[in-house]
Image (cartoon, grey):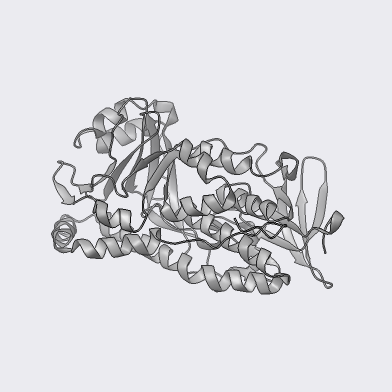
Amino acid sequence: MGSAGGRRRAVVVGAGIGGLAAAAGLTRTGWDVLVLERSPELRTEGAGISLLANAQRSLDRLGVGERVRARAAVMLPGGDGVRRPSGRRLMPPANPAFVRRHGLSTAVLLRAELHAALRDAVPPDRIRTGTEVTGVEELAGGGVRVRYRDATKPAEVTADVAVAADGVHSRLRGQLWPTAPGPVYSGHSVWRGVAEVDRRGEPGGTTWGRGLEFGRMPLADGRVYWYAVANTPPGAHAPDEHDRVLRRFGTWHAPIPALLKATPPDRVLHHDVFELLPPLPGYVVGRTALLGDAAHAMTSDLGQGACQALEDAVVLCAELARHDDVPAALAAYDRSRRPRAQSVVEASHRMGRTKLRDAWWQVLLRDALMALVPPRAGEAALARIGDWHPPELTDEGGTAR
């Protein structure tokens, strides 16, 4: 079921980071791609984003790694380590020799800049906004039909494969796995912002309190991206989220109060965090593959949500380029991605439960245990996630990327 000119066709549902990454990789390997995005405009909102080495390598395969790194600040994974609100150190920074040996680093940039790099890797006429996908249907002769509606009327398009990258509350996941539990509230919410200060040389770092966490990361222009996490009831929003963060974190160690005061109040973002537990029994149904949050929504406790979506995109594109048979390619994608992505979901969930403990005695126990954890244990966990190498992508001329 190829498109005009004999090229195979893919429909990608969702123009977030995962969807655009898949579209960029499929375009790079010779597919005719159509991206359908429900929002009337492509997203430009968001604060910062951190990309561990596994994600950076994935971006290299997609052809945008150099552009992303040119706009990013680079920091040691974890920055200067973990501290208590008083400033007392809980965990030391990562060992630089270990980091170099495994080629690990964290690139930090504005989310909008990453989104733009991926968007520009897709022909602009192949992205349609304001189109809400209503369902997918397998075709008897092979292929898939994607139904959607836009501002004018319902429509449909046929393709060889559909990629469901429509986010945490994926409509297509609900259609493909109607009996699977949907995403559940993690128990905490996240605030994000960018401090309008010049702190060149900021190492980054994390601070753990009682049911609270604050993280900071450098941006290339000297500003600082920060995030704050708290155990909160779901839907607990406030008219002034900036004031809400100040009241929780404004007395913590430097430079946290100064960063919050240097952040424009109207640019503080807040959202509840959802995760997909228990995991899905598969990421593929027929000729439709789930990707990113639609497949494995996770907490932000390891900073791997977007990173795992980028991994998904590269592996999916590599398998579709390697196999002429689409079902075989999708089966290989599912075998490759599901164990790794689900293990990261579980690790992120465990990390959140560890660092966001509420009871005073649990906090004391947590801090005592952190002092007993040997550095090698933390290094091994970091390497399992960050020292991942994506498969090569082969373009239509047979050239490996």
Q: How many marks?
A: 0
Task: Name the spot of residue 4 as percent of width and height, x first.
Answer: 86, 54
Q: Residue drawn at (69%, 70%), measured in percent from left and top?
A: 323
Q: Is residue 349 visible?
A: no
* Residue extending furthest toward the right: 4
The residue closer to the viewer here, 374 or 349, is 374
139 relative to 114, above or below:
below
Q: Is residue 64 left or right of residue 143?
A: left
344 relative to 94, above or below:
below
The residue closer to the viewer here, 327 or 305, is 327
Q: Is residue 82 visible?
A: yes
**The C terminus sits in image quarter:** bottom right
Q: Residue drawn at (35%, 58%), measured in percent from left and top?
A: 102
The residue closer to the viewer here, 341 or 388, is 388
**The N terminus sits in image quarter:** bottom right
Task: Name the spot of residue 141 as percent of width and height, x first.
Answer: 84, 72
Q: Is residue 259 left or right of residue 276?
A: left
Task: Name the spot of residue 54 as percent of width and height, x first.
Answer: 44, 56
Q: Give the quadrant of residue 41.
A: top right
82 relative to 338, above or below:
above
Task: Name the spot of residue 398 as percent of width and height, x first.
Answer: 69, 60
Q: Give the quadrant of residue 347.
A: bottom left
Q: Residue drawn at (25%, 34%), measured in percent from left and top?
A: 256
Q: Residue drawn at (48%, 53%), measured in percent from left and top?
A: 57
276 relative to 256, above or below:
below
